[in-house]
Amino acid sequence: MLKRLRIFLSVIVLVLSGYSLITQNFKLMPYFIFLLSAIILVTGLIELKRDKKEFWGYACIIVSLFAVYVSIQGFLLN
């Protein structure tokens, strides 16, 4: 389930970044960062579900929270 969600979010991010690259329209960047943080969060949850309570699962979740903070700042500035 989580792996499918990660693939779905990855496709959306790929399409969104391709659109931004082709049109040179960077107003969608906060959405891009938010979706990237969702991908990182799902990756962290997958790592924690593997019964290996190692550093990378927690690191992904922390980085995801920081990316959400950055995307909220981007939404507020636009």
Image: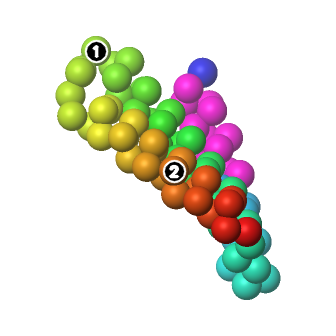
Can you say which quadrant of the picture contains the C terminus? bottom right
22 vs 56: above or below? below
* Residue depicted at 30% across the width and 33% down the height: 58
Magenta span: predominant SS is helix
What mark, if any, has residue 67 been given in the picture? Answer: none
Q: Which residue is mark 2?
A: 69
Query: Which-is-in-front pick, marks 1 and 2?
Result: 2
Q: Which residue is mark 1?
A: 51
Q: Position of residue 17 (x, y in %)?
A: 66, 67
Please indicate whether residue 45 sits to the left or right of residue 53 in the image: right
Please indicate whether residue 14 sits to the left or right of residue 41 in the image: right
Residue 33 appears anywhere in the view: no
Highlighted range, magenta: 2-12
Snapshot quadrant of residue 51:
top left
Residue 40 appears anywhere in the view: yes
Crowdedness of circle 1 by 10 Å Cα count: few (<14), some, many (20+)? few
| 3D distance between C-alphas at marks 1 and 2 | 28 Å
Q: Residue furthest top?
A: 51
Can you say which quadrant of the picture contains the N terminus? top right
Q: Position of residue 27 (x, y in %)?
A: 74, 72
Crowdedness of circle 2 by 10 Å Cα count: few (<14), some, many (20+)? some
- Amino acid at the residue labelled 1: Asp
Viewer-side residue, 45 vs 69: 69
* Residue depicted at 70% across the width and 76% down the height: 26
Q: Residue furthest front?
A: 76
- Amino acid at the residue labelled 2: Tyr
62 vs 18: above or below? above
* Residue depicted at 51% across the width and 50% down the height: 69
* Magenta span includes 6: yes
